Amino acid sequence: MTLLQVDRLGNALAGRYTIERELGRGGMATVYLARDLKHSREVALKVLRPELGSMLGPDRFSREIQVAAALNHPHILPLYDSGAAGEEGSGAGQLLWFTMPFVRGESLRQKSNRERQLPIEDALSIVRQVASALQHAHNHGLIHRDIKPENILLHEGEAMVADFGIALVLSGEAGKQGGGGVEDRLTGTGISLGTPQYMSPEQASADRTVDARSDVYSLACVLYELLAGEPPYTGPTAQAVIAKRFTDPVPGVRRLRPTVPEAVAQALTRALALSPADRFDSAAEFAKALTPPFAAAPRSRSVAVLPFLNLSADPENDFFADGITEDVIAQLSKIRSLKVISRTSVMQYKKREQSLREIGASLQVATLLEGSVRRAGNRVRIVAQLIDAEQDQHLWADTYDRQLTDIFAIQSDVALQIATALEAELSPDERKRIQREPTSSVRAYQFYLQGRYCYSRYTEEGIQRGIEYFHQAIATDPNYALPYVGVALAYAELAAGQGGGIVTPDVAYERAREAVMKALTVDPELGEAHSVLALLKMVHDFDWDGSENEFRVALELSPGAADIYDHYGWLCAALGRFEEAVALVRRAQELDPLMHRADVASTLLRAGRYQEAETAALRAVEFEPDYARGRSTLGWAYLKTGKAVDGVAQLEKAVALAPENTLYLAQLGQAYAMTGRTEQAHEVLRRLEEMSKVRYVSPYHMAYVFTGLGESDRAMDLLEQAYEEHAGSVYGIKGSFLFSPLHSHPRFLALLRKLNLTPPQ
């Protein structure tokens, strides 16, 4: 749609809806986020392309869409309203529109792009839900005709089928009335019903006898892609894809994913038959074939590795026990079909003060791995046992009494035994990565574990000490990749300037880059290294495409790593892709339930979902009252929901909890300024300036206060300085609500261009 058409639409809907922003566009329609003024709710407003509106006409559109509006099913996105914008006979044509609920979540396309191959049971569950929706529509005489991942939305674990409205008004039935059907006239416009990768053969050949079996075919294409990572037929052009349907045999899904159950593979082959007569007669039959009778309910493939207990005489060996814990977690995180809880959540259960059932419930997992380590000289004894958290039953146990040089073989064996016990899928590449020995030097491994132990304290002293140990590991074995990643992470942490200041960002970033590139030279398939490189490309290079590609590689290599999802969420938020960002950080929290709470809350804040952000921040503070970032996030949530006094009070608590952290202090100064307490805001500036005389203070942080004071040019001076120094979180200025007062400033727009960012909507 042109800007003129959008303006015309907005004028026509005045008093009923306000259009906020465009959400996306496809071959037949453009969809906008709009606010329903009567009911005070957000809706998705879908507007047909003007040429389609001219073909249909408002009367036929209204008549046909009533049928779609009558559908009432939990997995069908309902239609709220419809109409035509513009005056007949005006010469400008009428814009036909309808509204649906605005679903906060992601499409199946976004999920499949991120995960490539979904866990089998997840894919089957989604497809069964869609089949149920299709069966309901088919019972009412409505064929969807464009089932594809983009038209399946995911909300709180449930699948919702969208676009039944377009399916009906452009269908053959709509075209029969008045002669010369709409579908017959679409070819001349270059628009077709359906998408080549998911289009049934009869639909592709313009056969007018399309029925429910056409939707079954399309749904089978979707399931095939979810399982195999690609559609059943691919090609360089739409014509090539369609031609393969008529000439090539139905491809077997097990050639790309051997672990797909035979019954599912057979159901797919039948649903993808060339002739409709050879397929399932209904979506319900297809769904039934995907659930073999008397199939045993699969055990939940989720596990938390509790901290291994140090039974050695020397308490200094705690770092060794913690290292074993982390490495087993890292090995398990390479298995896509497993949900593995990350280190930061499990380490809180080191003292075992709760029952196993309570721990399992808190971490939201079905199984727990307990273990102990006893080290004496060059020998190590490791006991590991996998336990059903709900039933308190042992599923597997073993004792390893070996030479210390066997430590990596033990870790690999534990990971593989857990995968076997939980009947988790394991690809040949995953097995190969798990069995790979990271170093032949036990001494280098010990230095690495000590470095990681120190670094994970996240204090300036701990990070510096960690770097020293990492360098000792590298000196012992220069071909050991993980210590280079440790160095890179440590310097990236220092470069972020989260209240630190012991090294300038440019120096820290350069050292981080040198280390991560060395790690990738040693081991190109190290997921942790690709993740750090993605982070550097984002926060330092502002190379958004390059960063996203690295995040995808990292997730392919380490699909269970919570931090990768979290950092990928930062990227999406920085680009203004807030719905994806929320989905990613929530996935991070799912994999690390006791962490990333503040990230979820802050991402919701950036997305403008203030009430949800307040709820999430309250949970973070309730869980950890002394967490400064949680207090700060809650403060901004309160400020955004109109609770100014409470908001400032929470920000003051954040500063009290971390008095040396310039980020929280500067944000408090901004809040003081925004609430009229300008004298206190200037006092914060004086404190920051005094601190800058003895340590590095990010100009990005100083810019917060001047933005609150309304001194836009001074704020821009500091943001431009932050850009030159790659300081603070300058990469995130587009997605930061704290700088929204500057969004129309010419210098702010110019700075966005330097950052390779488009202006905010």
Image (cartoon, rainbow, N blue to C red):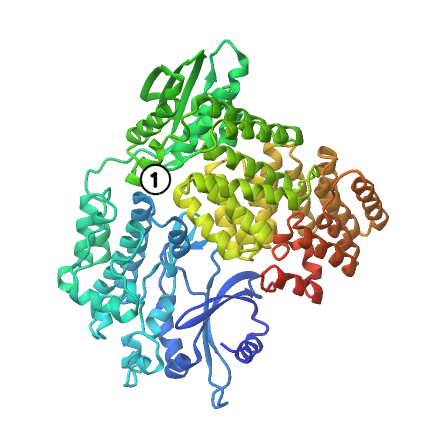
Q: Position of residue 658 (x, y in %)?
A: 71, 34
In the picture of the structure, the residue carrying the numbered disc 1 is 337
- At label 1, the amino acid type is Ser
Classed neighbour count for the residue bearing mark 1: other residues with Cα under 10 Å, few (<14), some (14–19), many (≥20)? many
Left or right side of 403 for 423:
left
Helix, strand or loop at label 1? It is loop
Which of 169 and 742 lies nearest the eye of the viewer?
742
Query: Where residue 116 sits in the image (x, y, percent)?
Result: 36, 50
> Residue 490: x, y in percent?
58, 36
Could you tell me which residue is drawn at 35 percent across and 74 percent down? 169
Vertical relation: 495 (above or below) 175? above
Residue drawn at point x = 37 percent, y = 81 percent: 56
- State the image quarter where residue 361 is shown: top left
Q: Nearer the viewer, residue 311 or 201?
A: 311
Classify 671 as above or below 321: below
Q: Is residue 179 left or right of residue 165?
A: left
Occupied quadrant, residue 404? top left
- Is residue 70 something that shows in the picture? yes
Quadrant housing residue 8: bottom right
- Which part of the image, by quadrant, shows the C terminus? bottom right
| 203 over 560 or under it: above or below | below
Q: Residue furthest top?
A: 313
Q: Would residue 169 appear left or right of 590 to someone viewing this image?
A: left
Q: In this picture, is 600 found above or below 71?
A: above
* Residue 721 location (% of width, % of height): 72, 54
Res 306 visible: no
